[in-house]
Amino acid sequence: MKKIISFIMAAFLGVMVTVAAFPAGDTYAATCEQTFLGLRPWYMGLTETKNDSTGKATCVVKSPSGNGADMAAFVWKIVLNITADITLMVGYVAIIFLVWGGYKYIMSAGEPGNVATAKKTITNALIGLVIALLATVIVNTIILVVDGAAK
């Protein structure tokens, strides 16, 4: 019975990841900065669309001007984009552990040791999720400040 439930949960999570990774329609087809599972590319906010000789639109990363402030903003933007992706992945891992803890709680069959382990897993996952959410908010706020300072 446990194998059947494990298979159903794995299939459900696989479907959810697929739905999140490949959104319906062409909503992201026209942009240079497509996301995958919410993960932003390292060059998010640094591109511009240019037409090549055939008239086809291509995405090009804008070069910072020669002054130090533009170069610092350029580098910080890349660092913050990568940091935002890391915090998002930490959030995904926390959610996976939350689901795993719930699964362990359901399958504990009332055994006190297994229930305690499952509750500890759920508690730690919730703490990790809160930390990841706060980190994401802080990083996104810093990105907005850097964007405002660069303009």
Image: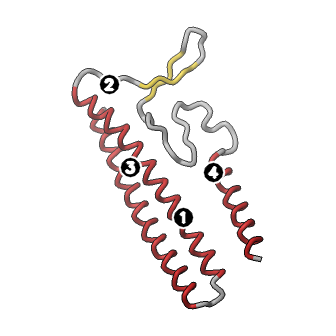
Name the residue that disc number 4 marks: 20
C-alpha gap between disc 2 and disc 4 = 33 Å
- Judged from the image, the secondary structure of the residue bearing numbered disc 3 is helix
Dot 4 and dot 1 residues touching (CB under 8 Å): no
Quadrant containing the N terminus is bottom right
Work out whether mark 3 precedes mark 1 in sequence or the reverse, and give the earlier one: 1
Work out whether mark 3 precedes mark 4 in sequence or the reverse, and give the earlier one: 4
The three-letter code of the residue at mark 2 reads: Pro
Work out whether mark 4 precedes mark 1 in sequence or the reverse, and give the earlier one: 4
Name the residue that disc number 1 marks: 95
| Picture disc at residue 140 | 3
Question: Image quadrant of residue 80?
Answer: top left
C-alpha gap between disc 2 and disc 3 = 21 Å
Work out whether mark 2 precedes mark 3 in sequence or the reverse, and give the earlier one: 2
Judging depth in this view, the residue of 30 and 107 nearest the camera is 107
Judging depth in this view, the residue of 109 and 31 nearest the camera is 109
- Judged from the image, the secondary structure of the residue bearing numbered disc 1 is helix
| Picture disc at residue 64 | 2
Give the left or right position of residue 30, taking residue 75 as reference. Answer: right
**Percent x, y for residue 73?**
29, 34
C-alpha gap between disc 3 and disc 4 = 21 Å
Judging depth in this view, the residue of 146 and 21 nearest the camera is 21
Work out whether mark 2 precedes mark 1 in sequence or the reverse, and give the earlier one: 2
C-alpha gap between disc 3 and disc 1 = 20 Å
The three-letter code of the residue at mark 4 reads: Ala
